[in-house]
């Protein structure tokens, strides 16, 4: 996806042409000690079928940009205020109202940027089809995907070392990538065991690069079926940079562990779940004859106050979670979330690999798509 952003914001206050302005410059509202924070610039890039991806920036070093999408003025008095962390998808009529602040300086003037896309419900507004036009395995789009790396256990006592594309940090091997697009347009996330008790895999994410709030997201996937394999397709709130987990909100569109694991109660299943502060819920999907090793489309319908999960057909909803019926704090109306695709190895849920575990094992992903509500 091309991210060549188009300038939207015009300078709104007579505080100069975007350079930091001193309090003595005569700008209305600048009469405090220090200098004035440069106003944020709101930019947009095309997504698909009229949707846009909005980004914000300020040239004041260390500035924080606060914004709202409901017309209210950003700040402590507005419960709709969000801290800008990443570009986000816009598919409906709204107005971005933004202000930048920085330590010891006056806040910037307010900037507003209206958007009025006229997009019918169910329209494809963003996707990654993992198209590879080369004659060899290739890196996923670096303007969309970055990586978690290392072997910190990631809160679940996981055993894998996560490797970024091209990493040669042991035990990662750039000649055997753990995530790549093949020449047929399929993303592979591969779990490997380069030596006894050593495991590598990949955890791809759009954090800081792309996020969205509300809509229908789905991925067509084929999953590994082997002891200790833990593939997932999920989202975390952009606010994890400031409020941590689980307050940021976690949406698990699909998690899976080996169908022969005793926790699976004798049948193969996937699960959709939600997590927030004091808020937890998960429901299995396990119709007769279901096998995660086949191609399936795993999806989520996200509307205000409600999360629904489906498999293969949006009409096939198997789990519904609502703000009004769950204990704890509902975080999913607080702001955009970013997308994660990963294959964990071991950990608290599936347990470690065993004698029957197959290496390499892999997740295959045909596409990730987002549709308007």
Image (cartoon, grey):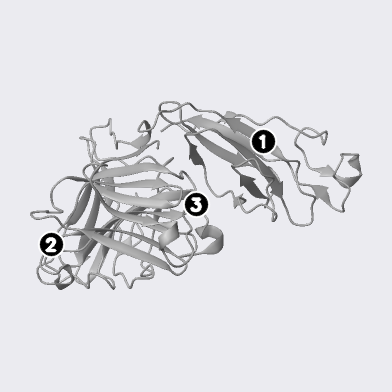
Disc 2: which residue: 358
Mark positioned earlier in the residue sequence (3 or 1): 1
Is disc 2 in contact with disc 3, using a CB cutoff of under 8 Å?
Answer: no
| Quadrant hosting residue 267 | bottom left
Instruction: Examine the rendered structure and indicate whether residue 221 appears above or below residue 149.
Output: above
Give the number of the disc on residue 112: 1
Q: Please give the name of the residue rendered at 72% of the width and 50% of the height, measured from the top-left corner.
A: 101
Disc 3: which residue: 333
Instruction: Examine the rendered structure and indicate whether residue 299 appears above or below residue 284.
Output: above
Whole-percent x, y for residue 232 in the image: 29, 56
Q: Which quadrant: the C terminus? A: top left
Dot 1, crowdedness within 10 Å: few (<14), some or many (≥20)? many
Mark positioned earlier in the residue sequence (2 or 3): 3
Q: What's the CA distance linking mark 2 and mark 1? A: 54 Å
Q: Which quadrant: the N terminus? A: top left
Q: Is label 1 in a helix, a strand or a loop?
A: strand
Q: Nearer the viewer, residue 324 or 182?
A: 324
């Amino acid at each position: 996806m091309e991210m060549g952003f188009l300038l939207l914001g015009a300078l709104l206050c007579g505080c100069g042409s975007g350079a930091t302005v001193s309090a003595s410059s005569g700008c209305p509202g600048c009469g405090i000690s220090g200098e004035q924070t440069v106003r944020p610039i709101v930019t947009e890039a095309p997504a698909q079928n009229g949707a846009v991806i909005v980004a914000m920036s300020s040239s004041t070093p260390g500035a924080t940009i606060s914004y709202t999408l409901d017309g209210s003025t950003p700040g402590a008095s507005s419960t709709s205020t969000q801290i800008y962390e990443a570009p986000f998808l816009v598919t409906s009529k709204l107005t971005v109202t933004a202000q930048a602040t920085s330590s010891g300086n006056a806040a910037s003037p307010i900037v507003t940027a209206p958007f009025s896309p006229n997009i019918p419900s169910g329209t494809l507004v963003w996707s990654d089809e993992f198209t590879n036009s080369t004659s060899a395995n290739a890196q996923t789009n670096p303007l969309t995907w970055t990586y978690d790396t290392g072997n910190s256990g990631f809160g679940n006592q996981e055993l894998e070392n996560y490797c970024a594309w091209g990493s040669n940090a042991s035990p990662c091997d750039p000649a055997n990538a753990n995530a790549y697009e093949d020449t047929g347009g399929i993303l592979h996330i591969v779990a490997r065991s380069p030596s006894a008790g050593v495991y590598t895999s990949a955890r791809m994410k759009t954090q800081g690069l792309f996020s969205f709030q509300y809509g229908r997201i789905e991925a067509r996937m084929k999953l590994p079926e082997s002891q200790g394999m833990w593939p997932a397709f999920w989202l975390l709130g952009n606010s994890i940079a400031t409020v941590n987990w689980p307050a940021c909100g976690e949406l698990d569109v699909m998690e899976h562990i080996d169908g022969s694991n005793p926790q699976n109660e004798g049948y193969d299943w996937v699960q959709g779940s939600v997590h927030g502060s004091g808020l937890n819920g998960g429901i299995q999907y396990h119709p007769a004859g279901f096998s995660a090793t086949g191609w399936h489309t795993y999806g989520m319908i996200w509307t205000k106050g409600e999360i629904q999960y489906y498999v293969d057909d949006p009409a096939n909803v198997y789990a519904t979670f609502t703000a009004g019926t769950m204990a704890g704090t509902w975080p999913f109306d607080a702001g955009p979330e970013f997308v994660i695709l990963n294959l964990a190895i071991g950990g608290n849920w599936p347990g470690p690999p065993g004698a029957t575990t197959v290496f390499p094992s892999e997740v295959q992903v045909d596409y990730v798509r987002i549709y308007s509500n």
